[in-house]
């Protein structure tokens, strides 16, 4: 019997993720934004679910993550929580809800926790937002960090290219990772950085490092559900592995339904009252 099967009934907590790192067990994480998909992901045995601000892209059709609001994130998080029994649910603090104002950051995090019943929040950045991290943690709210490519800062970077290739930026990422751990973060997502750098951070820190486009030397992986299922077909970075091609399957189903309706094949005699 696999470890995953044995542990499926046991609730995943922030502490349990740290224990998983300590015993060398990789952490699986995936995004979800609605009840139905969250229920399926949870029943499959996922360790953690991220209610990502990527909802701005895949659910609302925005080009960046910036437009999504705190109210919208809470709506998605509430929907996800209703479908989850086992996985740890982490919610992104959206752009504008924490930068430059630690009191507003705490108020945003409290709203997410109280209104959605989620179990942790995720926040992008290092030294620049450490006061917000500390203030949220002071209220007993678990915080997951996010370093490397931070999509909410896309207008500053001007590109979604790999981050921290240069020595100076790599040094800052390492320093920021230690800063977040020292502040009390329970885990850090590192996005789109050289695999060697991400592995070094994972080896230096005692908290889990969860990668996306950061190689296999970290403690776990996260992907966007719509990307790995092939629903979002216009996004194909090197780090993405497609586990299904649901986009084509869904379009075929829609076309078959249209044809059956047009040809009066649906509903048939056994599909009516």
Image: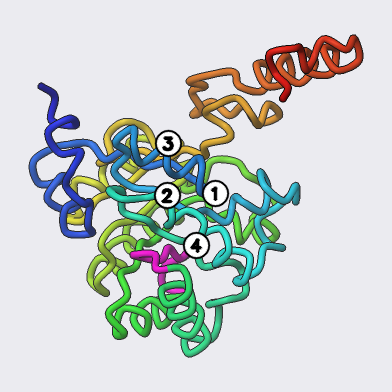
Q: Check if mark 2's residue and mark 3's residue have beta carbons within 8 Å.
A: yes
How many other residues sit within 10 Å of disc 3, few (<14), some (14-19) or many (≥20)? some
The disc placed on residue 78 is 4
**Residue beneath the point at 29% across and 57% down:** 187
**Residue beneath the point at 77% across and 17% down:** 267
Tell me how far mark 1 sits from mark 4, CA to CA.
8 Å
Tell me how far mark 3 sits from mark 1, CA to CA.
10 Å
**Left or right for 259, reference 269:** right
Disc 2 is placed on an element classified as loop
Disc 3 is placed on an element classified as helix
Q: Give the mark, 2 or 3, whose residue is nearer the N terminus.
A: 3
How many other residues sit within 10 Å of disc 1, few (<14), some (14-19) or many (≥20)? many
The disc placed on residue 34 is 1
Which sits in the foreground, 169 or 31?
31
Q: Check if mark 3's residue and mark 4's residue have beta carbons within 8 Å.
A: no
Q: Quadrant of residue 255?
A: top right
Which sits in the foreground, 196 or 94?
94
Q: Check if mark 1's residue and mark 2's residue have beta carbons within 8 Å.
A: yes
Q: Give the mark, 1 or 2, whose residue is nearer the N terminus.
A: 1
**Residue stretch rendered in magenta on the structure:** 117-128
Q: Is residue 64 above or below residue 243?
A: below
Q: Which residue is mark 3?
A: 40
Q: Give the mark, 1 or 4, whose residue is nearer the N terminus.
A: 1
């Amino acid at each position: 019997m696999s470890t995953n099967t044995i542990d499926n009934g046991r609730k995943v907590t922030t502490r349990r993720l740290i224990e998983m790192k300590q015993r060398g067990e990789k952490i699986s994480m995936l995004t979800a934004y609605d009840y139905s998909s969250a229920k399926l992901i949870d029943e499959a045995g996922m360790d953690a679910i991220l209610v990502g601000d990527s909802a701005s892209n895949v659910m609302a059709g925005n080009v960046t993550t910036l437009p999504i609001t705190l109210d919208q994130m809470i709506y998605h998080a509430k929907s996800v929580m209703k479908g989850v029994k086992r996985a740890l649910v982490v919610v992104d603090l959206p752009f504008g809800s924490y930068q430059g104002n630690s009191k507003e950051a705490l108020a945003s995090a409290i709203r997410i926790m109280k209104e959605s019943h989620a179990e942790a929040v995720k926040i992008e950045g290092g030294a620049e937002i450490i006061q917000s991290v500390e203030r949220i943690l002071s209220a007993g709210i678990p915080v997951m960090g996010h370093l490397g490519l931070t999509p909410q800062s896309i207008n500053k970077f001007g590109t979604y290219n790999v981050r921290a290739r240069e020595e100076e930026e790599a040094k800052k990422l390492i320093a920021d990772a230690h800063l977040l751990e020292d502040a009390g973060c329970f885990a850090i997502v590192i996005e789109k950085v050289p695999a060697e750098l991400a592995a070094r951070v994972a080896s230096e820190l005692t908290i889990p490092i969860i990668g996306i486009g950061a190689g296999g030397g970290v403690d776990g992986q996260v992907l966007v559900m719509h990307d790995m299922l092939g629903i979002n077909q216009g996004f194909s970075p090197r780090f993405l592995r497609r586990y299904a091609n649901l986009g084509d399957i869904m379009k075929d189903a829609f076309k078959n339904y249209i044809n059956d309706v047009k040809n009066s094949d649906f509903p048939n005699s056994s599909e009516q009252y």
